[in-house]
Image (spheres, helix red, strand yellow):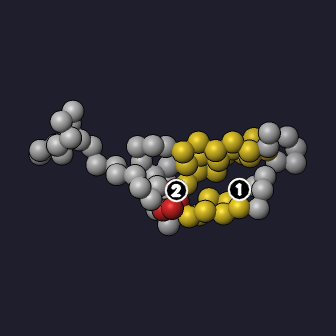
Amino acid sequence: FKEYILIDQYSYHIEQFAKNSNGKWVLTEYDLEDSILTLESVEFQIPMIEIYERINFEVKDEEGNEPTT
């Protein structure tokens, strides 16, 4: 394979590993909501906000309550 994508489930963070023409792996990281992930191996782009569209990053306790400060 020529590309490998890791998507964090707890925060806005994607790591994209792509092989360059020399066979070396190149890392690109995405951390911003308005970033756009562009795949190198196929012609495809997707906004990061769409990847995380249904994800709620708020931490909750075992009973489903938000923590108190």
The residue indicated by pointer 2 is 51
The residue indicated by pointer 1 is 39
In the depicted view, which residue is nearer to us: 63 or 41?
63
Q: Quadrant of residue 36?
A: bottom right
- The residue carrying pointer 1 sits among few (fewer than 14), some (14 to 19) or many (20 or more) residues within 10 Å by Cα, namely some
Check the picture and name the quadrant holding the N terminus.
Answer: top right
In the depicted view, which residue is nearer to us: 52 or 33?
52
Q: Quadrant of residue 64?
A: top left
- Which residue sits at x=61%, y=62%? 46
Where residue 10 appears, as percent x and y from the top left, is: 40, 43
Q: Amino acid at mark 2?
A: Ile
Q: Amino acid at mark 1?
A: Leu
Secondary structure under the numbered disc 2 in the rendered image: helix
Q: Which residue is the extreme one toward the top?
A: 62
- Whichever of labels 1 and 2 marks the residue nearer the N terminus, that label is 1
Q: Residue 58's mark?
A: none
Check the picture and name the quadrant holding the C terminus.
Answer: top left
Question: Horizontal placement of 12 versus 56: left or right?
Answer: right
Where residue 47 appears, as percent x and y from the top left, is: 56, 64
Question: Horizontal placement of 66 versus 53: left or right?
Answer: left
Question: Horizontal placement of 56 versus 63: left or right?
Answer: right
Is residue 25 among what the camera can see?
A: yes
State if disc 2 and disc 1 touch (CB < 8 Å): no
- Which residue sits at x=64%, y=44%? 5
- Which residue sits at x=34%, y=51%? 56
Examine the rendered structure and indicate whether residue 60 appears above or below residue 55: above
